[in-house]
Image (cartoon, rainbow, N blue to C red):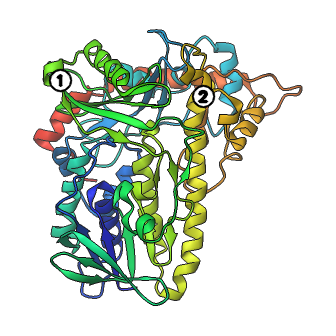
Amino acid sequence: MKHVVILGGGSAGWLTAAVLAADHQAASAGGLKVTLIESPDVATIGVGEGTWPTMRDTLRRTGVTETDFIRECDAAFKQGSKFARWRVDRDDDYYYHPFVLPQGYLETNVVAGWAKHSQVPFGKLVSFQPHLCEAGKAPKQFSTPEWAAVANYAYHLDAGKLGVFMRKHCIERLGVRHVSDHMTGVNAHDNGDIASLQTRDHGAIEGDLFIDCTGMRALLIGQHYGIEIQSQKHVLFNDRAIALQVPYADPRQEIACQTISTAQSSGWVWDIGLQTRRGVGHVYSSTHTTDEAAADELLKYVKATGGREQDIYTLPKITIRPGYRPKSWHRNCVAIGLSSGFMEPLEASSLVLVELAAGMLSDQLPATRSDMDIVARRYNDSFQYRWERVVDFLKLHYVLTGRTDSDYWRDNCRPESIPDRLKELLQLWRHQPPSRHDLYRIEEVFPSASYQYILYGMGFHPEQRPTTRRMDDPAQAEGYFREAAELTRKMLAALPGHREMLDHVMTRGMSKI
């Protein structure tokens, strides 16, 4: 295994190239050769602006500096998600899914203690982070080194700029060969493996392993090999998205440090704050509404949140085929990114799956072709599991709603639209909280604490067990609630504002570890 060829750029292609090149010393004489073919004729989608905290480790792994990344990608900090109007269609309905664990999460069952405070939102009782978001605070101080955190964080970023930033880093620092050309065909070995990719201007480019990062076109895994998408439209209904870029009416306006997801009649609106603009979009079900009605709801939201219609820049409409390929590694071809599948942008699952895919591929890169089938089976097993968990987790956001104002919300609660595994877990969670026993694999996409934040944020109230357990200690939980309140008090006083912190990074940079 000497040469990996990646077809397609964008976030998926260049992140994968960076991880492989950094880990396998592509810039050295004896390192892995990494070539990325990027068609100048194909534009990237340019959305997918939210990430998970794993992105910090991924970027650090590739050798970039956090200061350069924030400056070049219009990036801001993200400390979680805020869900508005998901339970009921009211202004006062919202809850948080923060990135820090509930205080005392590994020591006791804080849910048992929350039962005595059920009038207080679960996230705000067990965690300091929702309070930081509400106050517009950054997750780190001026003196906090690069990649380090006071409060766990991810990023909001300009997805188009991320691809450009990583391309420059890969070419100039990591030894990746960049071929700007259009693929015209696939040349195969007698055994069915890909031998080379035929290009318009550079001829045939040979390789040992080929990575399909061609987005929803899936030129290699889909069009060449015919590996089909397994549709999840019967579970997750959203299949359209309209995306906008909305400048701040006031350039000094505070920047939200959380993704804001606001439910609509037949979908939901995302609102992501970057340094110079907001990324706002409406993802919805074409079965339950029209494109025109969805656009009207989006415009109404933008105006209600301070956007001016004359400033809006509209991106091309996106068609979503909710589903995934159960087999994303076939022969010597691996699909990463949208070519492997896509559900909807809820909870930023798309980029984190790219990170997990690039990381596992790099960590287990087969040394020879005879090793490849073994690694491929393990890879496919891992990612089929991960896709199934993504489906479960996203569906969890819908099934507990109290909204009955449209067919969309009523249909989301139909038993036949809920995966069997999620039904079983909801049955178990009547008497015990989500835990590591429910999600037992290494590097779960969403940890059990995330399930707790959604479950109880959506108003789910567990029933009392017939017997008590040592872990169900309300007095111990009370102590952790006090700790969370004290941490909230200290952090609100010590942390700078979000825009203030970003201004510091832009002008002075971050200190090195």
Residue drawn at the location 55% of the way across and 20% of the way down: 125
Work out whether residue 164 or residue 301 is closer to the camera in this orientation and state it: 301
Give the image quarter of residue 458: top right
Which residue does the numbered mark 1 point to in the structure image? Answer: 248
Q: Dividing the picture into quarters, in which one does residue 355 lie? A: bottom left
Q: State the residue position of label 2.
A: 412
As rendered, which of 122 and 327 lies closer to the eye?
327
Badge 1 marks a residue whose secondary structure is: loop
The answer to whether the residues at label 1 and label 2 have Cβ atoms under 8 Å apart is no
Image quadrant in which the N terminus is located: bottom left
Q: What's under tag 2, amino acid-wise?
A: Asn
> Which of labels 1 and 2 is toward the front?
2
351 shown above or below 423: below
User: From where the camera sits, is residue 76 visible?
Assistant: yes
Residue drawn 49% across and 67% down? 226
In percent of the image, x 65 and y 48: which residue is there? 439
Disc 1 packing (10 Å; few <14; some 14–19; many ≥20)? many
Of all residues, the one furthest to the left in this rendering is 507
Front-most of residues 442 and 379 = 379
Q: Quadrant of residue 278?
A: top left
Query: Which of 287 and 345 lies nearest the eye of the viewer?
Result: 287
